[in-house]
Amino acid sequence: MEYDVVEVRPLTPMTLQVRFADGTAGQVRFEPSHLTGVFEALKDPIIFARARVVAGAVTWPGDLDLAPDAMYAEIKSHGEWVLR
């Protein structure tokens, strides 16, 4: 699908660069207020840096992942997806 993530690269402790199957690319930026609950583990820069692509989605250890369709829509429209 066009919104399958094919590449992810951590840029800073709270920002990722992603590229989708159709070539669309942009950034995903986490604001500290989003790092609660299951996402609290991503406050650790070592864990955040372990982002990878599995089955078209950005994932981390511990069954954390991001919805690729929502990410695609925001990046396609704004060049960035800010998680608040």
Image (cartoon, rainbow, N blue to C red):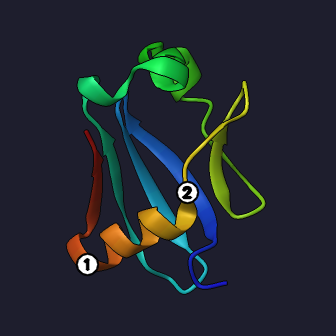
Dot 1 surroundings within 10 Å: few (below 14), some, or many (20 or more)?
few
What residue appears at the point 65 percent right and 57 percent down from the top-left corner? Answer: 57
Q: Which mark is residue 41?
A: none
Work out whether residue 42 can be spotted. Answer: no
Work out whether residue 39 can be spotted. Answer: yes
| Residue that protrudes farthest toward the left in the picture | 78
Picture layout, residue 66 above or below residue 57: above
**Nearer-the-camera pick, 67 or 28:** 67
> What residue would you read off at disc 1?
77
Picture layout, residue 41 above or below residue 61: above
**Nearer-the-camera pick, 21 or 31:** 31
Picture layout, residue 70 above or below residue 73: above
Return the x and y of residue 76 as percentages of the image width and height.
33, 78
Please state which amino acid type lies under the numbered disc 2. Answer: Ala
Image marks 1 and 2: residues in contact by CB distance under 8 Å: no
What residue appears at the point 59 percent right and 85 percent down from the top-left corner? Answer: 2
What number of labels is visible? 2
First-in-chain label (1 vs 2): 2
Please state which amino acid type lies under the numbered disc 1. Answer: Ser
> What residue would you read off at disc 2?
67
Picture layout, residue 20 above or below residue 54: below
Please indicate whether residue 28 sits to the left or right of residue 79 in the image: right
Return the x and y of residue 24 as percentages of the image width and height.
43, 79
Please indicate whether residue 28 sits to the left or right of residue 42 in the image: left
What residue appears at the point 73 percent right and 33 percent down from the top-left corner? Answer: 63
Badge 1 marks a residue whose secondary structure is helix
Please indicate whether residue 72 sits to the left or right of residue 28 in the image: right
Return the x and y of residue 45 as percentages of the image width and height.
46, 18
Please indicate whether residue 33 sits to the left or right of residue 5 in the image: left
Return the x and y of residue 14 as percentages of the image width and height.
34, 32
Which image quarter holds the C terminus? top left
